[in-house]
Image (cartoon, rainbow, N blue to C red):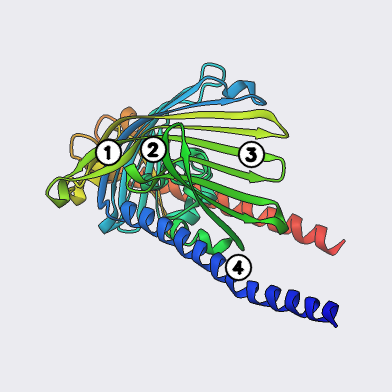
Amino acid sequence: MWLRSLKLCVLISFALSLPAASGQDEEMKSRAQAMFQRMYESRLAIKTIEVDFEHNLKLDDVEELNGCQRKYSLHFDYENDRFRGQLSRDCPNWPEGGPLTFAFADGRFLEFRDASVQGREFYGKSDRMYEQGSLAFEVSADPRLFGVLPVSFSFVANYTLSDLASMVGKFPEVEVRDEIVEGSPKTRVRLSDPSIEWEVTYWFDPRLDGLPTRIVMVSGETRDEGIVEWSQFSDHSTDGAIRWYPAKWKHTRNEAGVPKRRSEFVLGKCVLGQPVSKENFSWAHVDPPDGLVVREIKGKSRVMKEWDATLGEFVPWQPVFLRDIQEAADTPPLRTGLGKFALIVLNLFIALALVVFALRKRKDKDKRLTK
């Protein structure tokens, strides 16, 4: 009888302990969510930002990229969904060409490389950047996310600010502990999903308005670690409110204990809340070189145009062979009837040749299909 009573007491005690454990888990999740929400709101409060920084990269398994240094100058206007910037690269073992300049405003993206004779202009941001394989997709990453994600700078472009706010909800297990790390108070938040061997741990510092100083992500045998140093800057849009922004951000990746990637973000300049005009994101303001030929893509429309630095605007592009005709003529052919006639005949001849070529290809393809 006493044994049966003991078993019953054990079962009751176990049953009573379940709600308490569940309540404790919910309390931890709630606390973790509040910390991530605070971090999200501190980044969301930044309305405009202008930053200059360096990104130094070392890949232990790609010798060509070791010692690469990239310098960025970015300007984002979040209230109007506009950004612009410039990237210059220096890779001693793998020359990457000249600087890249880009801007996005009113749904229109533009870019050109200083070492190239052609630029691009298209409508729609992310899809086109993916399709074109543009470096501009990487450098259009939201600077508000620097130092607050468990990934390196090169992968920030794959995330948005809303991903930060919803991070806790993506993990079934949450643990929150207050710790003393090197004499400083920290709150450690561990998010994990054992079913896919994925774990992310943040160390939040209450002295930095709850921003992280260390982030570690473990996925299988891959371990990413970020160490962040923060500095304070005045926000000009809010009567000088003080905000934190990363001054230095080091990231390392190990695979099965072997170092694979090391990178360092070093801030040069940070200006918050400075008013910015729409013209800052136009072709004229990004200062393209004279004679730059731009390929404009809008839906199915494809247009070639050429930048005239003297006029500060685009003029219709004329291919090289048309320029040769103009230079050989005594008078500008476009201003005489004979010149216009010569251009028309030449263009008709080229068009006819292209049509014949296309018909032949179609005919050959039909033959192959019928065999």
Q: Residues within 10 Å of mark 3 (few under 14, many from 20)?
A: some
Q: Which residue is mark 2?
A: 112
Mark 3 sits on what residue? 223
SS category of the residue bearing label 1? helix
Seen at 22% across and 35% down, the residue is 309
Where's the C terminus, which quadrant? bottom right
**Given the current orientation, which residue lies at the most extreme top position?**
92
Dot 3 or dot 4: first in sequence order is 4
Nearest to N terminus: mark 3 or mark 2? 2
Residue occupying the point 18% across, 34% down:
310
Using the numbered discs, state the Cα–Cα distance from disc 3 to disc 2 in whole angstroms: 36 Å
Element type at mark 3 = strand
- Mark closer to the observer (4, 2): 4
Viewer-proximal residue, 136 or 146? 146
Between marks 3 and 4 in the image, the one whose residue lies nearer the viewer: 4
**Residue 286, labelled with which disc?**
1
In this view of the protein, which residue sits in the foreground, 238 or 211? 211
C-alpha span from label 2 to label 1: 10 Å
Quadrant assignment for the N terminus = bottom right
- Frontmost of labels 1 and 4 is 4
Give yes or no for contact between labels 3 and 4 (Cβ–Cβ under 8 Å): no
At 57% from the left edge and 62% from the top edge, which residue is drawn?
170
Left or right: 309 as drawn, with respect to 341: left
Question: Looking at the image, is mark 2 or mark 1 earlier in the sequence?
Answer: 2
